Amino acid sequence: MQKLNLVWLRNDLRLLDNAVLCSALKHAEKSGAAVLVLYIATPETWALHDMAAIKQDLLRRRVVQLQQELTELALPMLAIEGGSYQQVTEIFSTLCQQFELNVFVQAEYELREQQRDSAVEHLVQQHNGQFIRFDTQCIMSPGDIKTQQGDIYKVFTPFKRTWLAKLREEGVHCYGRPKKISQPKLELPDFLPLKDGDGSSADWEVAESGVLELMRRFCREKVADYHQQRDFPAQDGTSRLSAYLAIGVISAAQCVARLQLEAGEAWSEDKSGAGVWLSELIWREFYKHILVAYPQLIKHQPFQHETAGIRWHNNKQLFDAWCNGNTGYPIVDAAMRQLNQTGWMHNRLRMIAASFLVKDLHIDWRWGERYFMSKLIDGDFAANNGGWQWAASTGTDAAPYFRIFNPVTQSERFDPKGDFIRLYVPELSKFTGKTIHWPHAQPLSAYPKPIVDHAVARKQTLELFAEVKKTH
Ligand code: FAD
């Protein structure tokens, strides 16, 4: 049987800084195995994950592009339709009949992904092959950042301190471009070829070189002002790299290496633009570490157990108004319309919209978590769950439950001239000055009336939390 090192890519769709690919090639040099890169689309399981159509499209477009990029290395890439994770196992079963297989993958931390990988690992091992996982989603692997007592950090600031100390000690390492190899021709079984996407992500770059250039340009030209601009949705002040980090067109290590190169010592200063941007990349790692350490999160359970008892009102009509951007609160509506129209939402708005759903409408944060996932091009379980549990005050190191965003003052503060609101709420396009944040004093026909009174809703939230806090 022909020896084959299979590089099974999932959320690591890149050539550069790809430990999985480099290791499979290195191993093949010694063993004489052929190398094949594999991608399996699984829309049936994606649907169970509520994966947004725009993210599915980005994945498909990226895979096609990567197939071309790999031809430069003379590496074949098999891109196929697998339906569900169960069918993935059948695909591996077919491959195991034909090849002496070693499988190289980046570890994934979500529930169905772990079950899928265990099933494939078992199968490959039964055929005397190896299933080799690489912990490369983060710069510091989950479990590597611990307190002096050897515990997992539950609070971000000390986690960040230890994370930074380790970075200073070890530096950041990126794998280079893999070498071109010559290898025997492969006879592959017939599988269903990858289908085209729906084109909804067409505005998003998919070439690896293009995405790297976006990241480099951000580090060169914008990161210095990041701390001052990042909270204002009308400004183009953040990197907009989240979709690429989520599917691994670039790695966090590449971002940090470039940041250090461009920003000089500023990367290590807490209050510089570079330092604050690095903090956000560390939040990304924090939520992944927490997810691995507390498996209840993978099952959408709250981190703070007692909050599971909150009696959310879960009013479907209010939920629909929120989803459609018709709450009568301009900043919330503009945020939700940005999400619905573009598949992306600014971080400040994610916080405002999430807080509004939970603390003004009293709807279970999991409804919002699901809705965001179904729309976001950068949908990522750990970041989304972490963000929602933060906003709902159910998570680790979350906003305290009595700190409730006032959507109108948030709007005045972070969209002072209403420029962002005007972009997405055409009903308010003629409003200028302060009135845009609360236009209801003016006679308005087209714009919805506020669906709740914030002051009343706030009191009710405090009661909902008080009920569960006093019983614990
Ligand atoms: P930048 O500000 O340029 O930050 C750089 C990178 O750091 C981001 O690309 C992202 O990978 C990471 N990052 C930034 N902020 C956070 C954060 N708070 N938590 C974790 N990682 C962060 N981010 C996702 O990638 N996917 C999600 O599904 C997601 N859902 C969220 C849901 C809620 C309710 C909230 C409050 C936040 C969520 N975030 C999510 C985090 C954050 O809003 C986005 O990462 C950010 O807006 C993406 O824009 P950017 O790439 O311009 O970020």
Image (cartoon, rainbow, N blue to C red):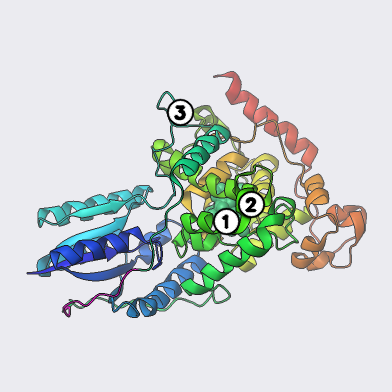
Q: Count residues near mark 1 (Cα–Cα under 10 Å), then give few for <14, some for 14-19, many for 20+.
A: many
Mark whose residue sits in front, 1 or 3: 1
Residue at 45% of width from left, 62% of height from top? 247
Where is residue 358 shown, x and y percent of the image? 64, 42
110 or 254, nearer to the observer = 254
Amino acid of disc 3: Thr
Considering the numbered disc 2 on the image, is that residue within a helix, a strand or a loop?
A: helix
Span shown in magenta: 178-186
The amino acid on which the numbered mark 1 sits, given as a three-letter code, is Leu
- The residue positioned 66% from the left and 47% from the top of the image is 351
Which residue was labeled with disc 1? 259
Whether tag 2 and tag 1 are in contact, CB under 8 A, the answer is yes
Residue indicated by mark 2: 274
Q: Residue at x 76, y 46 (%)?
A: 407
Q: Identify residue type, mark 2.
A: Ala
Q: Look at the picture and state if 151 lies above or below 363.
A: above
- Position of the N terminus, as image quadrant, is bottom left
> Which residue, given by chain and number where applicable, does mark 3 sit on?
147
Label 2 beta carbon less than 8 Å to ligand 1: no
